[in-house]
Structure formats: C-alpha cells, structure tokens
Amino acid sequence: MWEFCINLSDKNISASKKIYLALKDFCKDFNGIVTTYERCDSISILVSCEKCDEMRIKHYIGQLISEIICVDFKLNYLKENLTLPNLDTVSKNAFLQALLSFDKESDRYIIEEQLDLEKSIDVEAFYFFKLASLREKWKELVKIANDNKAYLSSNDTLVELLKFLVDNLELKCEAVNLMQKDNKLLFYDTNFNLLGQNDISEKDIDSTIISSLIALAPRNVNIYCADSFNNNLVHLLKQIFDKRINFLNVDGISSL
C-alpha cells in the first residue's frame, strides 16, 4: 500500500474540505481510502491506495495542492495586501478574480517545480518556506495595482484594465454557455456539460456571474438568459468581454 498525508492548519478549513472531497471522489475509482481528522489546531487528510495507483493519485494530489495555493492562498494574499479605492462590490470582485486568474499557469509551474510528494506535506510550511519566489511574483502584481489605485477609482479606467486582464488570460475552454432553468443559473461548456450552477436569487449574484466567467476563461461567452439580468450587469459584461460575448435566445438567435 502507498500512503500519504496532507496537513493544513484549521485556519484553512475551507481549503482542507475542498481537498478532502475532491480526493474522496477521485479515489473511489481506484479503491483508494481517504480519511481526515483534526488535532492541535491542524487538519490531516490521509490517503492510501494500492501501489499500482500511486502515481496517478500522487499526480492528482499535486494538481489539487497547486490549485489550492493558486486560488485560496493567492486570494488571501491579494485581500491582505491590496489597497483598492472604494469600488462597488461587483467591480471589486471582478478585479480580484482577474488578478487571481492572471498568469495562473506560471504560478502553477512554480508550485509544481517545488512539490515533493514522497510521504507527507504541510501545505502552509510548503507555501511559506518553499514558495518565496511565488510570493515575490504576487508582490510585484500587488505593487502595480496599489501604485495605480488612483486610476482604478475611475470606472472607465477600471473597466479598461479588467478588459486587458481578461483578454490576456490563458484560455481554458472554447466557450461557456450560461442558461437559466427555474431559479438556477447553469454554466455549461461547449458540449453543454455542466460546469457549475448558482441560485439566481443569492446575494451578490452579479459578482458571482462575472467572477465565474473570468475564472472559466473561455474564448467565447454565450448568454441565453440576459433578460433576467439587470442593465448594469449586461453593460459591464459587454465592456469586459467585448466581441467575445453573445447574447442569445434559446434558438441561438441574437437577443440584444
């Protein structure tokens, strides 16, 4: 049997839950065992599998840890170090998501170059002691944003910057199709495989829509439910995604 342990502090309980649930789902196809326990302000996730499945599960663990650092840890870093002007919630969250997604593949490369998954990993210790170059890279990004915060207080300038950041994200898929069914907003890929969903009545849904689309980084965005969006959201989506966004009805005909 191959065994591995992932340790995080209880301050990162949300990240630990993501890792645990993702690993549990992944390992069920290989008869792997995933358990978790808490002690002394830390959370441990234990994984065991047959030796023949070690490499594929180890590879998946590496991807999970890389994603947690690129998303959860980077978001915390940005929130702690950015000094943004008084932006509205939608603009602020869109800007954070754009910075979060910007140059993400380079972030992942730095992380995966340093990963050692032989017996166990303490994620926080790995982050603080092995990834100084990554934090330095984020520091430069934050410095640029902070040095130009006066310009970000102008809505036109902020939108132009958002458009620039989104246009320069590495594309993850050909298209995202956004539809509404009952009270749910459904995000589909090109082949209409479900990518995610949200309740249309949830708090800050406008922020969720824009942030999700930025994070998914599609070449094109097809929206089939714009009639349920407010005018401000439609206008901002047009500004950020420009010619890459299509507002359609269920028959695929332009609706705006």
Image (cartoon, rainbow, N blue to C red):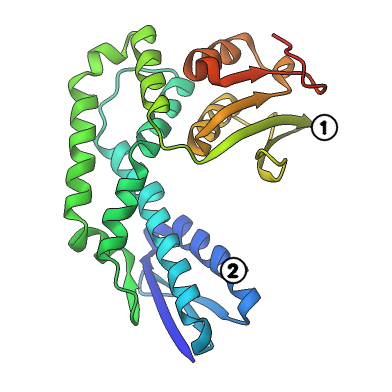
Res 38 quadrant in image: bottom left
- Of tags 1 and 2, the one toward the viewer is 2
Q: Residue at x 55, y 21 (%)?
A: 244
Residue at screen point 50% across, 35% down: 217
Q: Position of residue 47 (x, y in %)?
A: 49, 79
User: Which residue matches tag 1?
Assistant: 182
Mark 2 is on which residue type? Phe
Contact, mark 1 vs mark 2 (Cβ under 8 Å): no
For the C terminus, which image quadrant? top right
Mark closer to the chain start, 1 or 2: 2
Q: 10 Å neighbourhood of mark 1: few (<14), some, or many (≥20)? A: few
Q: Nearer the viewer, residue 36 or 135?
A: 135
Residue indicated by mark 2: 26
Q: Position of residue 65 (x, y in %)?
A: 40, 61
Measuring 67% from the left and 23% from the top, which residue is drawn there? 223
Please give the count of numbered marks on the rendered protein.
2
**Disc 2 on helix, strand or loop?**
helix
Residue at the (49%, 92%) spot, across then down = 1
